Amino acid sequence: VTVGVLAAGAITAAEAAGYIVCQIAGGVAAALLLRIVLSGVATGLGTPELAHGLVIGGTTVTITPASGFAIEAVLAFFLVTAVLSTAVAGRAAHLAPVAIGLTLVLNILMGGALTGAAFNPARALGPMIVTGNLGDAWLYGLAPIVGAIIAAVVHMGLSRLAYERPAAAAAPAE
């Protein structure tokens, strides 16, 4: 979300850098705390992973890295679109908690079994760093950033159209 909000011009690069450092530190701290709480229990501490041999209906599904990348990018796109359209744009700020919350729920339902539905580099990298399981770190780090930037570009384009259309309609025809 931070990269999408930065790409949309709603925060500065310095602010984004601060948020990103704090988010990654928080992800690592949460994974370390979980390791302490669950000491002695074998766990991945919430490390997301691509589905291998998942049975959906009568079909067995294995998510490839390319498919996982696309899924994570789309999930991030949905979340950043909800944030930019409500909380950042301000036109529907009163709906932001509901819109963002429902987007999170739907993202987890759609992607949870397929990729772990991380759609946030800090959420994925924290457990990966603590467990040392960095195999798909590139995917979980890069895909949400790509989805966030695409969401910002689409949001800014649609915002321009929304502002240009009323001005064009108000102009007298020659």
Image (cartoon, rainbow, N blue to C red):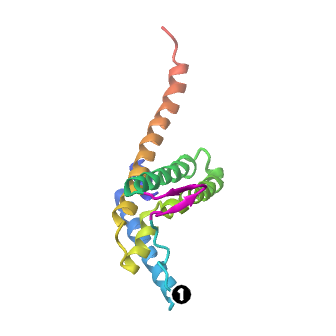
Mark 1: secondary structure: loop
Q: Which residue is mark 1?
A: 38
* Above or below for 47 versus 120: below
Q: Position of residue 23 (x, y in %)?
A: 44, 69
* Above or below for 114 versus 166: below
Q: Nearer the viewer, residue 148 or 49?
A: 49
Q: Nearer the viewer, residue 161 or 174?
A: 161
Q: Residue at x 49, y 37 (%)?
A: 159
Q: Position of residue 43 (x, y in %)?
A: 49, 81
Any magenta on residue 53?
A: yes
Number of labelled discs? 1
Q: Residue furthest bottom?
A: 40
Range of residues picked out in magenta: 50-63
Q: Position of residue 134 (x, y in %)?
A: 35, 72
Q: Residue at x 47, y 79 (%)?
A: 31
Any magenta on residue 124?
A: no
Q: Position of residue 5 (x, y in %)?
A: 44, 53
Quarter holding residue 121: bottom left
Q: Residue at x 58, y 49 (%)?
A: 86
* Above or below for 1 versus 123: above
Q: Is residue 162 left or right of residue 153?
A: right
Q: Residue at x 36, y 64 (%)?
A: 17
For label 1, the crowd category at 10 Å Cα-Cα, with few meaning under 14, some 14 to 19 and many 20 or more, is few
Q: Nearer the viewer, residue 84 or 143?
A: 143
Q: Residue furthest front?
A: 58
Q: Is residue 146 left or right of residue 162?
A: left
The three-letter code of the residue at mark 1 reads Leu
Q: Is residue 150 left or right of residue 96?
A: left
Q: Residue furthest top?
A: 174
Q: Nearer the viewer, residue 97 or 104?
A: 104
